[in-house]
Image: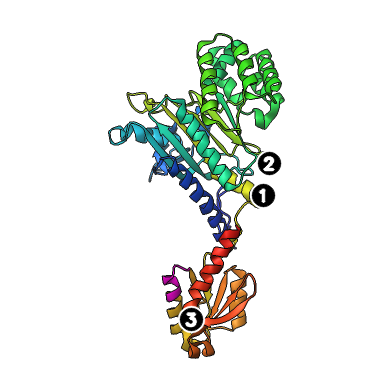
């Protein structure tokens, strides 16, 4: 009986073409992040369980992958604490907060970092949603200035434009505006987190679903109807009208008034047409304290990026409260949309090698390997066919792996110090001097790059 070869549910294998697409997107993300002065950081895949618990809200805590203690026998009477003290990383923000608290004296006052690593969540897999996935985070630590939010939005916008997106919306709201709205509809303080968790699902479950969530959490249904009515009223309004309507709705609630002022400042500083206020945006994670963001495209439910300000999180690991704000790009969802839309450059579909070096016969192996080495010295990627075989089979293999050129070093070529080069995309074939092969391949590669 053969063993099941599928990866664990919600996990994936990445074949060469998929890896090339992933690396292409990551390279653009890194390039833009670094152009804004962000530095790289990496943290362990495994964190202490106490580091993660209590940071993501009730629903987030349920999705943490816990790790059984090493070598412990399962005791049916053991408590959860006895069985597990470690967990797989749930996101990159909480580990960052731990790092800042741990290495505060080694880091600059204003610390800007980016981090691109996998995270794990015991979630239900769906389109663009996996149990193991990469986050591409960018965070600024140490400043309460709205310049931080404006630059984060600008960086994320630049990345998406460079990847080819032209229909994304960066939705923005503020946690204090949300709390002010909840006060305005008389939802008591102890029920406000529950209300935010329910509102955060609005784009997934709709208004009726939110009403049911409010009912199950024993929150006033009338309050829910008032909020949903406000969201519907503001749906197609411009930013200035939304700010006016929110100010009127929340009245003189002090922190809410400050929040609308901050949102107005972010909009002005960022100067992005894609930045749109959405009063219904809640973000379910409990550590957010200020402005919050989500990025959406029309053909994907859920967001392709999200983030916000979390001024209280780092203080949970140390004595000092340090302001912080971050944005996270969802690599997997971006890849799903780009693949479905055909947004990847054509050269990514070719093999990682530029040239396939054929083997004419056993006697020519040495010269073929020598020529392959010469081409590599010219910074070309060369794949050597591993055995002497019929030339037709070697060309068929070259076609299967989408290599750009095939190099033939047969008896005639060896005798005349020449090489036959076939362009697998155009079908053109020419016999040229051996020392001209590298130039010919490079010239065609530059031509392809100019077209993409």
Disc 1 to disc 3, how far (Cα)? 42 Å
Q: Which of the two discs, 1 and 3, sits closer to the camera?
A: 3
Compared with 183, 399 (above or below) is below
376 magenta-colored: yes
Please tell me which residue lies in front, 208 or 165: 165
Compared with 332, 274 (above or below) is above
Q: Do the residues bearing badges 3 and 2 touch, measured as CB atoms within 8 Å?
A: no
State which tag comes first along the sequence, 2 or 1.
2
The quadrant of the picture occupied by the N terminus is: bottom right
Please tell me which residue lies in front, 98 or 51: 98
Q: Which residue is label 3 attached to?
A: 434
The quarter of the displayed image where residue 297 is located: top right
- Label placed on residue 341: 1
Span of residues in magenta: 374-380
Badge 3 crowding class, 10 Å Cα cut-off, few under 14, some 14 to 19, many 20 or more, is some
Disc 2 to disc 1, how far (Cα)? 10 Å
Q: Which of the two discs, 3 and 2, sits closer to the camera?
A: 3
Q: Which residue is label 2 attached to?
A: 299
Compared with 29, 353 (above or below) is below
72 magenta-colored: no
């Amino acid at each position: 009986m053969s063993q099941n070869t599928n990866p664990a549910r919600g996990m994936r294998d990445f074949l060469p073409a998929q890896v090339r697409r992933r690396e292409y997107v990551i390279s653009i993300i890194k390039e833009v992040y670094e152009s804004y002065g962000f530095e790289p950081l990496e943290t362990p895949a495994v964190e202490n369980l106490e580091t993660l618990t209590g940071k993501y809200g009730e629903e987030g805590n349920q999705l943490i992958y816990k790790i059984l203690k090493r070598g412990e026998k399962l005791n049916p009477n053991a408590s959860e604490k006895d069985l597990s003290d470690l967990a797989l990383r749930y996101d990159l923000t909480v580990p960052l907060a731990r790092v800042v608290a741990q290495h505060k004296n080694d880091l600059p006052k204003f610390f800007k970092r980016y981090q691109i690593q996998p995270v794990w969540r015991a979630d239900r897999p769906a389109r663009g949603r996996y149990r193991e996935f990469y986050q591409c985070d960018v965070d600024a630590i140490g400043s309460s200035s709205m310049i931080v939010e404006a630059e984060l939005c600008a960086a994320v916008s630049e990345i998406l434009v460079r990847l080819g997106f032209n229909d994304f919306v960066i939705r923005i709201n503020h946690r204090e505006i949300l709390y002010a709205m909840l006060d305005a509809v008389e939802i008591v303080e102890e029920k406000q987190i529950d209300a935010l968790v329910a509102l955060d699902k609005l784009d997934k479950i709709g208004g009726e679903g939110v009403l049911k969530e409010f009912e199950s959490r024993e929150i006033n249904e009338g309050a829910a109807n008032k909020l949903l009515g406000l969201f519907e009223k503001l749906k197609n309004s411009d930013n200035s009208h939304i700010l006016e309507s929110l100010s009127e709705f929340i009245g003189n609630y002090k922190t809410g008034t400050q929040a609308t002022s901050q949102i107005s400042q972010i909009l002005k500083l960022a100067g992005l047409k894609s930045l749109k206020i959405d009063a219904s945006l809640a973000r379910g994670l409990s550590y957010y304290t200020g402005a919050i963001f989500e990025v959406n495209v029309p053909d994907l439910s859920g967001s392709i990026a999200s983030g916000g300000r979390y001024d209280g999180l780092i203080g949970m690991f140390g004595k000092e409260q340090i302001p912080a704000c971050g944005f996270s790009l969802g690599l997997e969802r971006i890849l799903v949309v780009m693949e479905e839309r055909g947004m990847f450059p054509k050269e990514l579909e070719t093999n990682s090698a530029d040239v396939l070096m054929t083997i004419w016969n056993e006697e020519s192996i040495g010269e073929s390997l020598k020529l392959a080495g010469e081409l590599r010295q010219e910074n070309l990627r060369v794949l050597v066919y591993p055995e002497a075989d019929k030339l037709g089979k070697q060309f068929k293999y070259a076609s299967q792996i989408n290599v750009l050129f095939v190099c033939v070093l047969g008896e005639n070529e060896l005798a005349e110090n020449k090489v036959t080069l076939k362009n697998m995309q155009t079908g053109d074939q020419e016999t040229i001097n051996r020392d001209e092969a590298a130039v010919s391949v490079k010239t065609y590669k530059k031509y392809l790059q100019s077209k993409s």
